[in-house]
Image (cartoon, grey):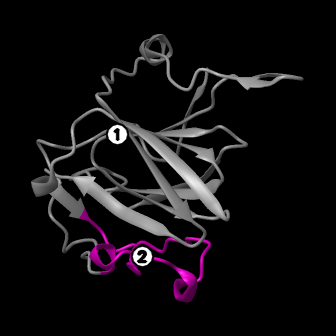
C-alpha cells in the first residue's frame, strides 16, 4: 500500500512505486484508482507549482471554510522540509505539527487533508514544489500561522537569520490568535 499513516489522523505519506532502468524512471504521481482502493475520496481541481531558492520558507497557510483545501504535495526538483499543523477544532492532535523531507530524489508525497496549515522550507539550492488542491483558491479565505511560533516548536532546519520569508508571512498570527478553522 503506497499510503503510510502518520502520527496525526487522516494525514498520509504517499510513496509511489518507482520504475527505474538505464533510461531513467517512471511513476504515477497520482492515480484516482489508488486513492479509491485506499478509501481516500478526493477530487482534485487545481494544480500549482512554485520555484524557490535555498532558505525560502513559505507558510504556514490555509484556506478557511467553506474554501478549505486538501492538498497532495510533492517536490519535482530539489528538497524541502514540508510541514503541517493540525488546526481542526476538537482534534486530539490540534496544534501538533508533522514534518517530512520531500525531494525529487525520494519521490515521496504528503496528502494533507482540509484543516491543516501547510508550509515548507527549501533545503536545496533550488526547488520546484508542486501540489494538487481539491478546492479553488480564494484570496478572501486566506489564513495562516506564523512559521516561527514558539508554541509550535518547528525545526525548519534553516537558521532564522538565513530564512527568506515574505512580508505577508512574517506578520501571520500565532496559534490561538489565527482565523478559526471551523
Q: For residue 67, what is the image quadrant?
A: top left
Q: Main secondary structure of the magenta part?
A: loop
Instruction: Report the front residue among 106 and 112.
Output: 106
| Image quarter in which the N terminus is found | top right
In the displayed structure, would residue 46 be above or below residue 82? above
* Residue at (48, 43) in percent of width and height: 130
Q: Earlier in the sequence, mark 2 or mark 1?
A: 1
Q: Secondary structure at mark 1?
A: loop
The span picked out in magenta is: 144-170
Magenta span includes 155: yes
Residue 165 numbered tag: 2
The location of residue 64, given as percent across then percent down, is 16, 52
* Residue at (56, 26) in percent of width and height: 29
The location of residue 52, given as percent across then percent down, is 52, 61
Can residue 95 be seen here? The reply is: no
In the displayed structure, would residue 6 be above or below residue 162? above
The location of residue 109, given as percent across then percent down, is 55, 38
Residue 113 numbered tag: 1
In the visual, does 108 lie left or right of 85? right
Report if the CB atoms under discs 2 and 1 are less than 8 Å apart: no
**Which tag is nearer the camera, tag 2 or tag 1?**
2
* Residue at (42, 13) in percent of width and height: 36
* Residue placed furthest toward the right: 22
Q: For residue 159, what is the image quadrant?
A: bottom right
Amino acid at each position: 500500500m503506497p499510503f503510510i499513516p502518520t502520527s496525526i489522523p487522516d494525514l498520509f505519506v504517499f510513496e509511489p512505486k518507482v520504475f527505474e532502468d538505464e533510461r531513467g524512471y517512471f511513476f504515477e504521481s497520482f492515480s484516482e484508482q489508488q486513492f479509491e482502493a485506499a478509501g481516500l475520496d478526493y477530487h482534485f481541481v487545481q494544480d500549482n507549482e512554485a520555484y524557490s531558492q535555498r532558505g525560502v520558507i513559505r507558510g504556514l497557510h490555509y484556506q478557511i471554510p467553506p474554501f478549505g483545501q486538501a492538498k497532495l504535495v510533492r517536490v519535482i526538483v530539489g528538497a524541502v522540509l514540508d510541514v503541517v499543523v493540525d488546526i481542526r477544532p476538537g482534534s486530539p492532535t490540534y496544534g501538533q505539527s508533522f514534518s517530512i523531507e520531500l525531494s525529487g530524489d525520494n519521490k515521496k508525497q504528503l496528502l494533507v487533508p482540509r484543516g491543516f496549515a501547510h508550509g515548507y522550507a527549501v533545503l536545496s539550492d533550488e526547488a520546484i514544489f508542486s501540489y494538487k488542491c481539491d478546492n479553488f483558491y480564494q484570496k478572501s479565505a486566506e489564513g495562516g500561522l506564523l512559521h516561527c511560533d514558539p508554541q509550535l516548536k518547528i525545526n525548519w532546519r534553516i537558521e532564522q537569520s538565513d530564512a527568506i520569508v515574505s512580508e505577508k508571512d512574517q506578520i501571520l498570527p500565532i496559534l490561538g490568535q489565527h482565523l478559526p478553522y471551523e
